[in-house]
Image (tube, helix red, strand yellow):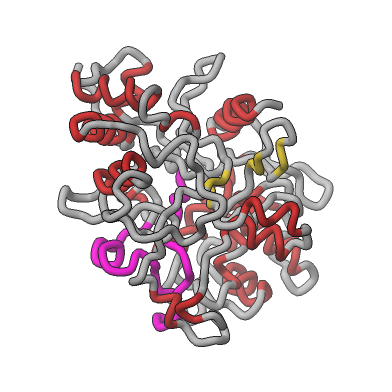
Amino acid sequence: MSREGVVYWAAAVVLGLTATAAVGGGDPPPDDQLAPLGKLLFFDKNLSTPPGQSCAACHAPEVGFTGPDSDINLKTAVYPGAVHTRFGNRKPPSAAYGGPSPVMYHDESEGLWIGGMFWDGRATGWTLGDPLAEQAQGPFLNALEQNNPNAKLVCSKVAKSAYAGLFKELWGAGSLDWKKDIDGTYERIARSIAAYERSAEVNRFSSKYDYYLKGQATLTEQEAWGRELFEGKGMCSACHISAPGPNGEPPLFTDFTYDNLGIPKNPDNPFYTMPRKWNPEGKKWVDPGLGGFLKGAGYGPEVYEPEWGKHKVPTLRNVDLRPYPEFVKAFGHNGYFKSLEEITHFYNTRDVESESWPDPEVKDTINKDELGNLGLTAEEEAAIVAFMKTLSDGYTPTP
């Protein structure tokens, strides 16, 4: 399947046209039935150690299911875990429009890794057949995030929850008997969360651009020009696909690939000062991205070195969604940029305004074909930003 074919297939998944993989040899409940349970799990603050941190703590609806604290976004961009003195190494990616990412594979014709979840792709989908479900399993057991010592504790908390009855009603008798089947119970928890993250509540397709594509809204002159530049001179759509699919599938604004944009280190990232137990390299740490995952997975240098410093291409849907105009959002895998205007200017001028930008964190694998010297004017940059602002869900078309 071609890269665009994967994207359009994935759009069908997020719209509910593809079933979840089976669990334990049987057919699981449909995603639309599992989503309410998944929502309860997603917002449950008791599923951390100590209690207090839910999935939504780093992936909140009002900001497009990414980091909801303006002050953190401005200062560090990386969020504290359940133990508030511990920090991960990257900013929270959006949990919206992430479900359609395919099981990770290497496209030999394109020479690209495609699919998986997390910035580095480590939730490949190779185990469960669903990268989103594998991603949902990760933070619960991460000492820098929800900090549970094992899956057993997570399962026991769910079994004692107010929604345990709903869990057993949906998944069947014995589905929460973690004493007999920890792995199966933990998998069902993750698949339920994934069902919510694939639901219409999370993936609303209700932006101005969606209504424009349906002929129910009109772009302003600046927004329309920005779309033209986005798909042309700015080359944004090379990775953030903006055109509908052949059967009218709404665009997801990502191709699920990985790229090194040449983003500088974020000096305010608190991971640099974490104890050696979690960051033995201290301030010398360099984020290896996809390459680091591939190396850890046992691939040889000929495979992982070309991917060093590459990170997942994020969806641009809800890229500007915020609860109030002054709210700060962070951009880039490490949150180095604090506005759409800033990161757009970086894309445009990285290679021609070297005095404006610090050195890239990883130099050898930088994408120099699609960004760095785009020749956009200030007005053209502003138009592209105006177009990206039409991608926020919750738009109400004028009757």
Report the residue at 48% width, 58% height from top: 42
> Visible in this render: residue 244?
yes
Q: Position of residue 94 (x, y in %)?
A: 44, 50
Q: Compared to 183, does 309 lie above or below? A: above
> Visible in this render: residue 197?
no
Residue 22 location, quadrant: top right
Residue 323 falls within the magenta-colored stretch: no
Q: Position of residue 130 (x, y in %)?
A: 67, 47
Q: Give the overall secondary structure of the magenta segment.
A: loop
Question: Could you tell whether 243 is left or right of 392 in the image?
Answer: right
Q: Position of residue 376 (x, y in %)?
A: 28, 31
Q: Compared to 253, does 331 lie above or below? A: below
Question: Could you tell whether 76 is left or right of 108 in the image?
Answer: left
Report the residue at 45% width, 66% height from top: 54
Report the residue at 57% width, 73% height from top: 142
Q: What's the magenta region?
A: 67-96
